[in-house]
Image (tube, grey):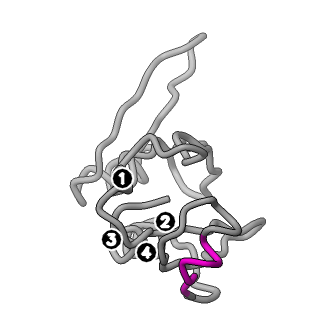
Amino acid sequence: MVSDLDASIDFYVRFLGLRVKREFSLSAEESAALFQMAVPARAVQLLFDEGMLELFAFETEASPERGLPGGLFHFAMQIDQSLDDFMAAARRRGIPVSTIERNGKTICFIQDPDGVFIEVKA
C-alpha cells in the first residue's frame, strides 16, 4: 500500500527498473471484498525478472502513509551491478540510503517514497 501511486511507479520503474504490466482500479465494493476497506483504489502491477510487485493507493484521507495493516515494511532484491555503484546512484537521486556491518559484511538498504526498506544485494 502506497500513499502516492505515481511517485511509487516512478521510483520502482525509473530507478529500480521494474516494468509496468498493467494499471487498474478497484471499486469500493471490490476493495471491501479483497481488503476489508470499502474505498476505491488505484493499482499497478510491476514486473521484475522473477516476480511481480502490486502497489495499491487507496483514495481516502484515513489511509495512513506507513504501517498499514498488512502493508509492506521490508523486502530484499538482488541487483546485477556493483553495490557501490547502485548505492551511489541512489544517493545522487536523493533516495535515503543506510548501511550496517554484520559479521564482516555490509548490508545495504534504500527506501521507497513511502519509507519501505529495500535491502539491496549484489
Q: Which mark is residue 60?
A: none
- Residue 97 vs 102, above or below: the answer is below
Question: Which amino acid lies under the numbered mark 1 shown in the image of this protein?
Answer: Asp
- Would you identify the image quadrant in which residue 121 lies? top right
Position in image of residue 18 (x %, y %): 56, 73
Q: Earlier in the sequence, mark 2 or mark 4?
A: 4
Q: Earlier in the sequence, mark 1 or mark 3?
A: 3
Looking at the image, which is closer to me, 85 or 94? 94
- Residues at marks 2 and 4 touching, judged by CB atoms closer than 8 Å: no
Dot 1 crowding, Cα within 10 Å, few <14, some 14–19, many 20+:
some
Please state which of the two labelled residues, at mark 2 or mark 4, is closer to the viewer: 4
Q: How far is the residue under mark 3 from the one under mark 2?
A: 13 Å
Residue receiving disc 3: 7
**Secondary structure beneath label 1:** loop
Q: How far is the residue under mark 2 from the one under mark 1?
A: 15 Å
Start-end of magenta stretch: 25-31
Q: How far is the residue under mark 3 from the one under mark 4?
A: 6 Å
Quadrant placement of the C terminus = top right
Question: Which amino acid lies under the numbered mark 3 shown in the image of this protein?
Answer: Ala
Position in image of residue 6 (x %, y %): 35, 77
Query: Residue at coordinates 36% horizontally, 52% vertically from top-left?
Result: 114
Dot 4 crowding, Cα within 10 Å, few <14, some 14–19, many 20+:
many
- Residues at marks 3 and 4 touching, judged by CB atoms closer than 8 Å: yes
Residue receiving disc 1: 114
Dot 3 crowding, Cα within 10 Å, few <14, some 14–19, many 20+:
some
Residue receiving disc 2: 16
Question: Which amino acid lies under the numbered mark 2 shown in the image of this protein?
Answer: Leu
- Residues at marks 4 and 1 touching, judged by CB atoms closer than 8 Å: no
Residue 122 visible in the picture: no
